[in-house]
Image (cartoon, rainbow, N blue to C red):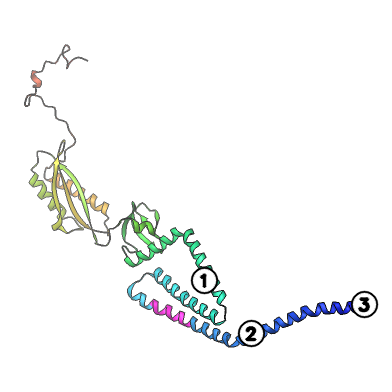
Amino acid sequence: MQEGKLNSVGKEIKEPLEVIANKFTVWFDTFVDMIPNMLLSVILFILFVVVSKLSRKVFIKIFQKSSDNKALENLFATIIYYSMMGIGIFIILDILNLDKAVTSLLAGVGVVGLALGFAFQDIAANFVSGVILAFRKPFLVGDIIKVGGYMGEVTRTNLRVSVIETFQGQEVYIPNKDVLSNPIENFSVLGTRRIDLAVGVSYGDDLKTVKSLVLETLNNLDYVVRKEDMIFTYTGYGDSSVNFEIKFWIKYPIEPSYLEMRSNAIIAIKEAFDHNDITIPFPIRTLDFGIKGGEKLSEMNIGPNNSLGSK
């Protein structure tokens, strides 16, 4: 009776051991059969590493001939490197008969990419806009620009934001998609900027003399350029003055600044007017007594019983 039980127990232990042994035998046979494919896969892996690095170096040399944007250079060089490595990995997996793994990996990449696209669509928009800005180059680091109400010097750029240091001393980080979707005013690309200055002179001054004097004064002012494009126009009659505008060009953005040049022009015009007895009048009101229908002051009856004298 006991001997039968021992045989039964031995049989129960023997069967799992045989299954395990068979599994190891199959795995070993499969491993031996896969040795040539594994060696080929190792060789291909090394080959694709070398090819990926060479492709990256070749791209960098070609890119540097057309652009000096380091951020864009590193981005595309990295994309090329990992794209080549990805192709190599898929080929190696196929050689190792891991087709199902390749299919699952591709499906997983597609699902993950779709989820990331929805989750990071703003980041993706900024990234794409950064790439477009890097190619179009509407401004460079050091340029004075105005974007979305912010004006200042471009201090740095990357594929996500453009950084502007305003004239008030603040750094403004503007997302690249906002930079691309708004008008960009670049004050540095042409090297000049126009100042529009409004002035008024009294009605008693000779207007031709005023015009000649203003043009001569600004022509002799330092840092004024494009003097032949200077525009002087009378704009209308004010309450106490004949108003005019003078439009002139200065070098920009170099010292002295736009505000300093405008201040220098105001000072120079005022000094020229003072030396030539030309008046920039105060706001005044004229009371008409006895002129074209008005009553003379000497003939007016001013007393306690009339309207002028009553309180």
Label 2 Cα neighbours within 10 Å, binned few <14 / some 14-19 / many ≥20: few
Point out the frontmost of discs 2 and 3.
3
Which amino acid lies under the numbered mark 3 shown in the image of this protein? Gln
Reading the chain from its start, which is encountered first: label 3 or label 1?
A: 3
Which amino acid lies under the numbered mark 1 shown in the image of this protein? Leu
In the image, residue 202 lies at what x, y percent? Answer: 13, 39
Q: Residue 127 occupies which quadrant of the picture? A: bottom left
Residue 174 falls left or right of residue 282: right
x 49%, y 77%: residue: 85
In the image, residue 30 lies at what x, y percent? Answer: 64, 84
Residue extending furthest left? Answer: 292
Which amino acid lies under the numbered mark 2 shown in the image of this protein? Phe
Marker disc for residue 2: 3
* Element assignment for label 2: helix
Marker disc for residue 106: 1
**Magenta-colored span:** 49-60
x 44%, y 60%: residue: 123
Q: Nearer the viewer, residue 31 or 216?
A: 31
Residue picked out by circle 2: 31
Residue 287 falls left or right of residue 128: left
Label 3 Cα neighbours within 10 Å, binned few <14 / some 14-19 / many ≥20: few
